[in-house]
Image (cartoon, rainbow, N blue to C red):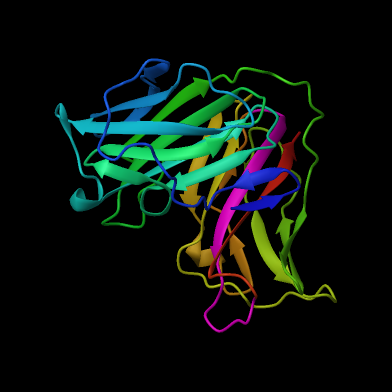
């Protein structure tokens, strides 16, 4: 888990679940069906949460996935699942993926945990075919659904600050670059790594970075791999995107350090930035 200025984007540790097998739905829990946004493959997805999600407590979430009415082992069928959580104030972003962030007590049942802030949240679930890297976007993804989740409290918080730079490791920073963002107009974002002197250094491997751009208030969600044609070891660049409305969005990216680069973290690095469209 990496926390930067109160903004979280997962790699979360595997959760410790009370499920040895899967217990029946207990008192104080509820199972919800998300709103389906894209359905190129007809999955059945439900999400189980506590009846009341208590802020500042580690909360268990259970995602059940079926196809043709039967639980499906996603990985065994070359399918992959991402779940994305974002708070209404954009101060909490978590991205979970099937292999790293879920327990699977039985096929089609995925269990994870998250410490919710005292804000309303939106959760997106996306399922893709992993036989091709080109599996995002409404025409190519299998399934995308959205669910609104409320915690027991809603605090009044200051708006998230626009951010352009984060710590990468002890000797480097990671910087977000983009032209002026205008609602309704195509845009690209890019990130690069700088040394202490402000010089770009080639520490990024370009094989499979992915990112998410979300806003609960704008009901906006996009997940993509970076544009390989415009990316190299010095800079990674997003696919072209269009921000639908003026306002603030959170951009979270997972990047991979080049082998042998000498940076002092594991090979996967995740961080997030706040951007604003006019």
**Residue 72 at x, y = what percent?**
19, 39
Q: Could you tell me if residue 122 is visible in this image?
A: yes
The answer to whether residue 210 is above or below residue 39 is below
Which of these two is toward me, 45 or 211?
45
The answer to whether residue 123 is above or below residue 76 is above
- Residue range in magenta is 245-263
Q: Quadrant of the C terminus?
A: top right
Instruction: Tell me the residue at 49%/30% (across/down).
Output: 123
The answer to whether residue 102 is above or below residue 160 is below
Q: Is residue 276 magenta?
A: no
Instruction: Tell me the residue at 15%/26% (across/down).
Output: 69
Task: State left or right for residue 213 relative to residue 174.
Answer: left
**Residue 35 at x, y = what percent?**
40, 20
Instruction: Tell me the residue at 66%/61% (across/down).
Output: 191
**Residue 174 at x, y = what percent?**
71, 63
Task: State left or right for residue 44 relative to residue 256.
Answer: left
Instruction: Tell me the residue at 55%/49% (across/down).
Output: 10
């Amino acid at each position: 888990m990496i926390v930067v200025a109160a903004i979280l984007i997962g790699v979360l540790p595997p959760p410790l679940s009370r499920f040895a097998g899967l217990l029946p739905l207990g008192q104080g829990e509820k199972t919800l069906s998300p709103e389906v946004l894209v359905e190129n493959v007809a999955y059945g997805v439900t999400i189980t949460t506590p009846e009341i999600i208590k802020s500042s407590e580690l909360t268990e979430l259970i995602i059940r996935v079926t196809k043709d009415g039967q639980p499906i082992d996603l990985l065994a069928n070359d399918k992959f699942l991402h779940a994305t959580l974002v708070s209404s104030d954009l101060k909490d972003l978590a991205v979970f993926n099937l292999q790293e962030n879920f327990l699977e007590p039985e096929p089609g049942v995925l269990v994870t945990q998250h410490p919710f802030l005292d804000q309303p949240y939106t959760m997106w679930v996306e399922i893709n075919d992993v036989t091709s890297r080109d599996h995002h976007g409404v025409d190519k993804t299998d399934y995308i659904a959205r669910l609104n989740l409320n915690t027991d409290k809603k605090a009044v918080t200051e708006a998230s600050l626009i951010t352009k730079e984060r710590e990468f490791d002890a000797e480097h920073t990671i910087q977000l670059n983009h032209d002026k963002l205008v609602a309704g107009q195509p845009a690209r974002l890019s990130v690069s790594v700088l040394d202490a002197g402000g010089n770009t250094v080639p520490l990024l491997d370009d094989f499979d970075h992915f990112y998410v751009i979300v806003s609960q208030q704008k009901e906006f969600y996009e997940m993509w791999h970076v544009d390989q044609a415009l990316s190299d070891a010095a800079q990674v660049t997003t696919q072209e995107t269009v921000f639908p409305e003026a306002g603030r969005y959170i951009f979270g990216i997972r990047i991979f350090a080049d082998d042998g680069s000498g940076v002092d973290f594991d090979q996967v690095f995740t961080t997030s930035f706040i951007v604003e469209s006019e």
